[in-house]
Image (spheres, grey):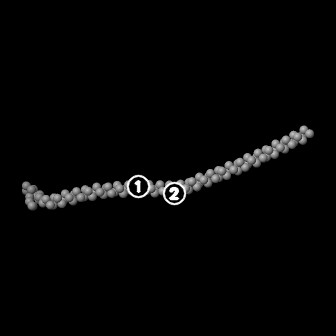
């Protein structure tokens, strides 16, 4: 069914050709939408994987942090122990000084 449209040189196309062109156009449109959707899904998946990787990295450093905190606590407790030891020796010295002072006072009283 080929012909001229009012003498302007435009050929009429058969209905099969028109259907084919319309279906191709529709298919390209659907492909474009599907590509955009797939691209969006890929971006989301990559973003989630990246976040999971950083979360795992953080979780991996947590035991290390805990270990350093425990180490700090241990050194703090060690310092506290040495301070208490010093205080004990100071009290012992004070006690012996008081004892000596008491014995000196008794000697002077006699």
Pointer 2 local density, CA inside 10 Å: few below 14, some 14–19, many at least 20 = few
Q: In this view, does 67 lie to the left or right of 27?
A: right
Secondary structure at badge 1 equals helix
Residue where numbered disc 1 is placed: 47
Q: In which quarter of the image is residue 91?
A: top right
* Identity of the residue furthest to the top in this view: 109
* Identity of the residue furthest to the left in this view: 7
Secondary structure at badge 2 equals helix
Residue 37: x, y in percent? 32, 55
**72 or 12: nearer the eye?**
72
Q: Are marks 1 and 2 in contact (CB under 8 Å)?
A: no
Label 1 vs label 2: CA separation? 20 Å
Q: Residue at x 8, y 59 (%)?
A: 3
Residue where numbered disc 2 is placed: 60
Residue 58: x, y in percent? 50, 55
Q: Is residue 108 left or right of residue 7?
A: right
Q: Quadrant of residue 45?
A: bottom left
Q: Residue at x 45, y 56 (%)?
A: 52
**12 or 73: nearer the eye?**
73
Q: Is residue 70 placed above or below 102 in the rendered structure?
A: below
Pointer 1 local density, CA inside 10 Å: few below 14, some 14–19, many at least 20 = few
Q: Quadrant of residue 97?
A: top right
């Amino acid at each position: 069914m080929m012909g001229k449209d009012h003498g302007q040189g435009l050929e009429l196309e058969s209905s099969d050709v028109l259907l084919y062109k319309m279906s191709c156009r529709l298919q390209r449109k659907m492909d474009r939408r599907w590509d955009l959707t797939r691209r969006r899904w890929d971006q989301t998946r990559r973003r989630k994987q990246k976040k999971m990787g950083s979360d795992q990295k953080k979780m991996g450093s947590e035991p290390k942090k805990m270990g350093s905190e425990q180490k700090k606590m241990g050194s703090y407790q060690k310092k506290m122990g040495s301070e208490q030891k010093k205080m004990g020796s100071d009290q012992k010295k004070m006690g012996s000084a008081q004892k000596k002072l008491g014995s000196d006072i008794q000697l002077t009283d006699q």
